[in-house]
Amino acid sequence: MNFLAHVFLSGNDEELLLGNFIADSVKGKQAALYSEGVQKGIQLHRLIDAYTDTHPVVHQTKERLRYKYKKYAPVIADMYYDHFLASNFTDYSIEPLPVYTSRIYTLINTHFELLPPRIQRFFPHMMQHNWLLSYGEITGIAQALGGLSRRTSFESGMETAAVELQENYSLYAHDFRVFFPELVAYAEQVRRELRQ
């Protein structure tokens, strides 16, 4: 899962959301530097990733991508899934996506000083160009994947992955529709356990 799915799966808990958002930039014992609530968000992020990485439907998505994109298939799958969440957001939330993304940016920006340096570097750009909202359009996904491709050390081919999405749209959309409700239920269960 990518940024949009991770923040969405945090529910309405501010610290949980913040921890979930920053988790990929918090390594090992660095988590202890944060409040208990943020630490739980980091834990939630890692549990979501583990669940996603072992799910048979996600495996199917990645295998479909692996022939062209090799080790970058999981990254592309994450972006595709954020696209389907963004483009079908009203299926999962009563809050319109533009309102939701604006609220999330404001919340995260309020805690800017807590963000790891890597996130502090890209977050203003993310907010200014509204990445989370742009994921709802294939052009937004193409832009994001192009940016990722430019930052890889090796030839990734990710800059062509938006074409792959267009050509096999219904297959990837089906994978998402089957998988995501199961992930939502799992994340709700984990959040309940973390609150105990």
Image (cartoon, rainbow, N blue to C red):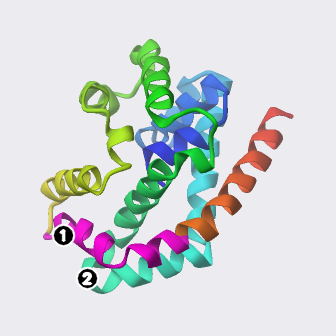
Q: What residue would you read off at disc 2? A: 68
Residue 150 lies in what quarter of the image?
bottom left
Q: Amino acid at mark 1?
A: Thr
> In the image as oriented, which residue stretches furthest toward the bottom?
67
Nearest the viewer among 136 and 45 is 136
Q: Which residue is at a point 34% across and 65% down the rendered structure image?
A: 76
Q: Amino acid at mark 2?
A: Lys
Task: Verify CB contact (< 8 Å) between mark 2 and mark 1.
Answer: yes
Q: What residue would you read off at disc 1? A: 160
Magenta stretch: give its range. 155-175
Horizontal side, residue 84 vs residue 37: left or right: left
Badge 2 marks a residue whose secondary structure is helix
Q: Is residue 167 magenta?
A: yes
Figure check: 63 above or below 31: below
Badge 1 marks a residue whose secondary structure is helix
Nearest the viewer among 163 and 63 is 163
Residue 8 lies in what quarter of the image?
top right
Q: Position of residue 60 (x, y in %)?
A: 51, 81
- Residue 2 is tagged as none
Figure check: 128 above or below 93: above
The crowd level at tag 2 (other Cα within 10 Å; few <14, some 14-19, many 20+) is some
Q: Which residue is at a point 41% across and 55% down the rendered structure image?
A: 83
The crowd level at tag 1 (other Cα within 10 Å; few <14, some 14-19, many 20+) is some
Mark 2 vs mark 1, CA separation in Å: 10 Å
Q: Position of residue 111 (x, y in %)?
A: 46, 16
